[in-house]
Image (spheres, helix red, strand yellow):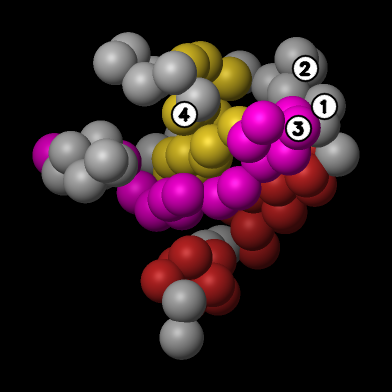
């Protein structure tokens, strides 16, 4: 099972609704309205915060977005993104 799906199933109802809403906005390409920041050292990686949850995604050539990481913030969250 995909780690992101497994993590999503463990979220509280409130967090799951917030994350789901953000993922829909990212999928539709509407990231300007989100608290979205480009990660330092990466050209096409962005993150959105939802409390302690981090949603990291990659922008493709045609402004499509791919989920890279969905999980709680920890010491190793940003280390394995290469």
Q: Earlier in the sequence, mark 4 or mark 3?
A: 4
Residue 59 appears at what percent x and percent y? 61, 32
Q: Nearer the viewer, mark 2 or mark 1?
A: 1
Q: Residue at x 43, y 50 (%)?
A: 69
Query: Judging from the image, what secondary structure is the residue with disc 4 in?
Result: strand
Q: Nearer the viewer, mark 4 or mark 3?
A: 3
Q: Label 2, label 1: how many angstroms apart (C-alpha)?
A: 7 Å
Q: Residue at x 61, y 18 (%)?
A: 35
Other residues around mark 3 within 10 Å, as few (<14) / some (14–19) / many (≥20) = few
Q: Which mark is residue 33?
A: 2
Give the extent of the magenta segment: 60-75
Q: Earlier in the sequence, mark 3 or mark 2?
A: 2
Q: Is residue 73 at all visible to an observer of this figure?
A: yes
Marks 4 & 3, CB-CB < 8 Å contact: no
Q: Which mark is residue 62?
A: 3
Residue under label 1, please give it: 30
Q: Nearer the viewer, mark 1 or mark 4?
A: 4
- In the rendered image, residue 27 lying in the magenta stretch gets the answer no
């Amino acid at each position: 099972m995909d780690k992101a799906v497994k993590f999503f199933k463990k979220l509280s109802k409130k967090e799951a609704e917030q994350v789901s809403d953000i993922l829909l906005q990212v999928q539709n390409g509407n990231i300007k309205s989100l608290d979205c920041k480009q990660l330092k050292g990466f050209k096409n990686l962005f993150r959105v915060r939802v409390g302690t949850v981090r949603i990291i995604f990659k922008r493709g050539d045609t402004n499509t977005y791919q989920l890279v990481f969905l999980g709680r913030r920890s010491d190793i969250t940003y280390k394995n993104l290469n």
